[in-house]
Structures are given as C-alpha cells and as structure tokens.
Amino acid sequence: MTGGPLRLYELPLSGNCWKIRLCLAERGLPYERVTIRDPERTFADAAFRRLSPLGRVPVLVCPDGTALWESGAILTWLAENTPLLPRDATRRAQVMAWLFWEQADLSPALALPRFFRRNGTEKANAERMRALQEKGRACLEFLDTYLSRQDYLCGAAYTLADLACHVYVMLSPEGGQDLAPFPAVRAWLERIAARQAWEPLLPAG
Amino acid sequence: MTGGPLRLYELPLSGNCWKIRLCLAERGLPYERVTIRDPERTFADAAFRRLSPLGRVPVLVCPDGTALWESGAILTWLAENTPLLPRDATRRAQVMAWLFWEQADLSPALALPRFFRRNGTEKANAERMRALQEKGRACLEFLDTYLSRQDYLCGAAYTLADLACHVYVMLSPEGGQDLAPFPAVRAWLERIAARQAWEPLLPAG
C-alpha cells in the first residue's frame, strides 16, 4: 500500500462511500477523491465498468491500477494489520459477522427508506417503506440490546464493525427512523463521532 | 482449530448452511451436525440466542464454546490459511468482494423467490417476486459475462468466492429462475459439482 495515492470514486451522499473515507481517515492514508457528478452516465461507461464491474461506487483504485469494489471488501483491505480488524481468528470472525450483517440486513432496512425519501419515490414505495421501517426498527432494537452491555459491537474497543455499522444508523433519521427509543445506540453514535479520525458525511455549512 | 469437533447448527434446506458444510468438506474437518427440527421454537429460545444473537442459522460452535454466526464470517474463518482465501491482500479483497455481493445482492434475489415458493407464499408476494426475479436475472447475466472469460470468479482457481456464490445459483431454479440462457454459469456449476469435496444439499433418494 505504498508508491502513490489511492483513488476513491464516490458519490457525496452515499453511506457506503462515507465508510471508505472514514476508514481512510482512521488509517491516516492520503487519497485522491473522484466525485462522480453524472452517476447514470458514468456507471454505464465502459471505462468505468472496467474498474467497477457492477457499475457502482465505492471503487478504490490502488497505485498499481488494481480496482477494488464492494465497500465491505475495501474496508477489510484497508483495515488489515490494524486494530480495526483483529488478527486473532475468533475476534476477526466476530468483526466479520457484523460486516456481513450490515450489508445483508441493516443497510437495506435503513438505507433504502432514506433513498426513497431523497429521490421522492417514498409514496410509490409506500408498502415497501413500511416493511423496511419495521425491519429497521428490529435491527436498531438488536443493536441497542447489544450496546447496552458494551461500548462497541465487539467489546470494549472500536473496530471495523462499528465503523461499518454506524453509518446507515446515523443516516437513518433521513429515512424516517426515530432513534429516541434507542439510548445505547445514540450513546454509541456519539462515542464514534467523537473519534479524532471521524468526519461528517458532508462538510458543515 | 483443534481439541474437539466443531458443532454446526443448521436447517436441511438452508443454502447458507449448505455453504458451511461444503467449506467443512473442502477443509476435511470433522464436525457434529445439529439439525434444527422446530426452527420457530429453537430460534426464540434463550439458550440458542446466546449462541446466535439474531436467532438464526448457520451457527458454528468452536471446541472452546465460542459461537460464530453469519455464514460469510464463518466461511472466512474456516478458509483462513487455505488456498480458498488467498493471503495476498489484493487477491483476498477480490474474493471478499464476491462474498459481500453474494450476501447483499445475489442471495436475496435468488433465495427469497425460492423461499416464497417453498413455503407457499408466492402469490401473496407476487409483485415482490417479479422484482426479485428480474434482479436475479441481472445477477446471473453479470455472472455469465464474468465466467465466459475465466473458469472461476477470481481467475483460474476455485476459491471461497465460487463456494459462496454457486449455492443459491444452483438452487435458483427452485425459485423459478431459468439457467438455460447462461451457459457459462451452467458450466461453472458443473465444474464445482465435480470437485471431490462437493456434496449435494440433500442426500440422494
């Protein structure tokens, strides 16, 4: 991971891209940020598809030209050999469990309602919204129970599990979730946002 | 990973549990198979919830009592230090990308229609079914393009990416997917099923 800057292709409002920026900040790694302004055109473009076969972001391009896709894979690549991703096999599997759960369960339940609201298709997806909101509340309840017993998802220390899971939780009020009933989740979000490397999704102002 | 048998809690028809059995077979590891016969009761049971906080399978219990959950996390734990999960950081990230994609995109699109059909709720979920079938076809098209250029998802060698991704593809006709238009996918499934360690979801007969 030496020899030139990393290049991150991203969208400003994407939670999955935010995770990569937060992980780069935790690592203190410099990178070139390529913000895509016309996603529809770019995602269909053949040159972009050579970097991102699924035509989406985030994509992280290494100095040697290798392109990494899928936020979870990029995060584990960035976190390797750091305390964010423990070397011990069992502790590592526990971090990985949260990463997979986040992508398969938590993120669809929280990110899609936010997406429907932001792009004005909330009414067209009313039934789907209700089902997702309910699933989202169940996920938040699960997190709240867990976090009422320990400061971070894998125990006393912040890991990649927290980095990956807190993003769509923090954004979930934009999709209509109320975090008031989840005090342990709110305290966890505050602990994470107080980290030196943490930065907001968008610059202030 | 020594000192006693591993214990796998599973359901006979679950694709995610099948993946773990296939990975255990690839590793040649002995294990105790605990088949859950009354999932509704077991998944709500407090003792089971101590093993599986989300109340689902697969769960793999280690000889020291540590319980691992989320199929992707269990697979990476089992595959560590084997050719299934390359040590090289870039190649590892490529395997991981397929694992995350499988859980977030491929598996919901292929496994849910199969689930609706098997439990007789296909009609009640008609609209959802149609959307999922379409998404499933797009995933299969994506796989077919990839596999028309190389034998396995990460190149010339079978890895955890193939192990994880082939399961719900192989089961997808049970959810109404037609694999006829995807010759490279079908050839890939045949290559995988010819592996010495491969075993069918259910015993023959």
Image (cartoon, coloured by chain):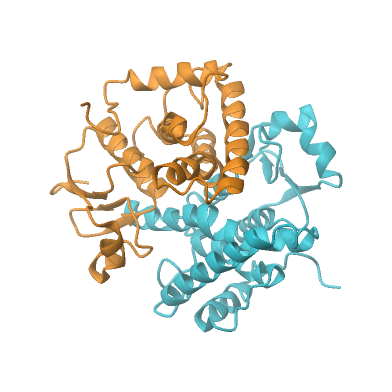
Chain colours: A orange, B cyan
Residue B11 percent location from the top left of the image: 77, 51
Q: How many labels sit on residues?
A: 0
Q: Quadrant of the N terminus of chain B?
A: top right
Q: Position of residue B65 (x, y in %)?
A: 68, 31
Would residue B110 be seen by someone viewing this image from the given angle?
Answer: yes
Q: Position of residue B53 (x, y in %)?
A: 66, 32
For residue A123, above or below residue B14: above
| Residue drawn where x is 57% and y is 22% of the image | A144
Residue found at the very far front of the displayed protein: A123
Report whether B21 appears left or right of B44. Answer: left
> Which of A87/B121 is in front?
B121
Which residue is situated farthest in the left direction here?
Answer: A4
Q: Within the image, what quadrant is residue B21 found in?
A: bottom right
Q: Quadrant of residue B52?
A: top right
Front in this rendered view, residue A5 or B90? A5
Residue A80 % position (x, y)? 35, 40
Position of B116 relative to A147 (above/below) = below
Question: Is A169 rendered above or below residue B84?
Answer: above
Image quarter where the C terminus of chain B lies is bottom right
Q: Is residue B26 left or right of residue B115?
A: left
- In this rendered view, identify the residue nearer to me: A166 or A63: A166
Residue nearer the viewer, A107 or B50: A107
Residue A25 position by quadrant: top left
The answer to whether residue B1 is visible is no
